[in-house]
Image (cartoon, coloured by chain):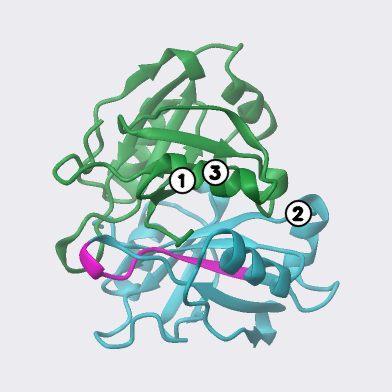
Chain colours: A green, B cyan
Amino acid sequence: MKLGRMNHLGYAVPDLSAAIAHYRDVMGAEVVTEPFDMEEQGVKVCFVNTPGHDGTEGTQVELLAPLSDASPVANFIAKNPLGGQHHVCFEVPDIEAARAEFEGMGKRILGPTRIGAHGTPIFFVHPKDMLGMLTEIMETPKEGAHWSN
Amino acid sequence: MKLGRMNHLGYAVPDLSAAIAHYRDVMGAEVVTEPFDMEEQGVKVCFVNTPGHDGTEGTQVELLAPLSDASPVANFIAKNPLGGQHHVCFEVPDIEAARAEFEGMGKRILGPTRIGAHGTPIFFVHPKDMLGMLTEIMETPKEGAHWSN
């Protein structure tokens, strides 16, 4: 496996509107994508776009807020009431090949490969096998699909 | 202020060599910078380079390990023994202008502006004013100085 682009930093927040206002008003974000629900994961999600080098797209900040008290992110917020880093996501060219590699290394993968917030297949690797960092592995979106949902 | 490039994600680890091995062997990192001590901050530091779009430089992972038990990062590791996200760093074109803006917004800045690990001026903003995220603001390195220490 070859280290891919850091697609996004997943950040859990108690209040999505307040977090969007923070990124717009304090940090000066110009593009925040429209929030949408990921019912299965129990979260409302949006992305803050950041610039990369030379006019390219940079690593996004994914803001995640719990949809209900039953959301796994609700537990995270209970422990981190202001918000906190939830996961980091790196791209790979081929999700099945990456999954086989992580499995071959004995890394614990959390659940099946599924379609993530960018519409491409993803899986999560257990933080205990990843320096404490919940890690999302995401198949690189096809050319032209960057930064879409 | 306009949101700048996410320069790096600061990640605290208990053992720098083990973390470098993880990034090389598990994640497939090709370039990890030579570790060096930042005595004043009580940390040993190196950067894992990640690719950006179109051959550009992506957001780095900064690995931080405590130099001694007296290091502020040692407390962080005591609470997060495997490691964990420590801060996130965004670039600005002018550090003094950015500092004045954060101060004007009533954000708590941690100490004086100083020279950071990339050799450019930086300051940190208190996580309690930043959605729980310890935030480093860093003046963009001059052209040609990317990814150097």
Residue annotated with mark 3: A100
Is there one chain holding both mark 2 and mark 1? Answer: no
Q: Indicate whether A130 appears above or below B49.
A: above
Q: Secondary structure at mark 2?
A: loop
Q: Where residue A22 sits in the image (x, y, percent)?
A: 37, 40
Question: Tag 1: residue type?
Answer: Ala
Viewer-side label of 2, 1: 1
Q: Chain of mark 1?
A: A
Residue annotated with mark 1: A97
Q: Indicate whether B58 appears above or below B39.
A: above
Asked whether disc 1 touches disc 3, contact meaning CB atoms under 8 Å apart, the reply is yes
Q: Residues within 10 Å of mark 2 (few under 14, many from 20)?
A: some
Residue B138 falls in which quadrant of the image?
Answer: bottom left
Tag shown at residue B82: 2
User: Is residue A46 found inside the magenta-colored segment of the image?
Assistant: no
Q: Indicate whether A46 appears above or below A27.
A: above
Question: Tag 3: residue type?
Answer: Ala
Residue extending farthest right? B69
The residue positioned 60% from the left and 65% from the top of the image is B25
Closer-to-camera residue (A112/B133)? A112
Q: Secondary structure at mark 1?
A: helix
Look at the image and give the residue range highlighted in magenta.
Answer: B54-63
Q: Secondary structure at mark 3?
A: helix
The residue positioned 67% from the left and 84% from the top of the image is B40
Q: Is residue A136 left or right of residue A56?
A: right
Question: Tag 2: residue type?
Answer: Leu
Closer-to-camera residue (A1/B40)? A1
Q: Chain of mark 3?
A: A
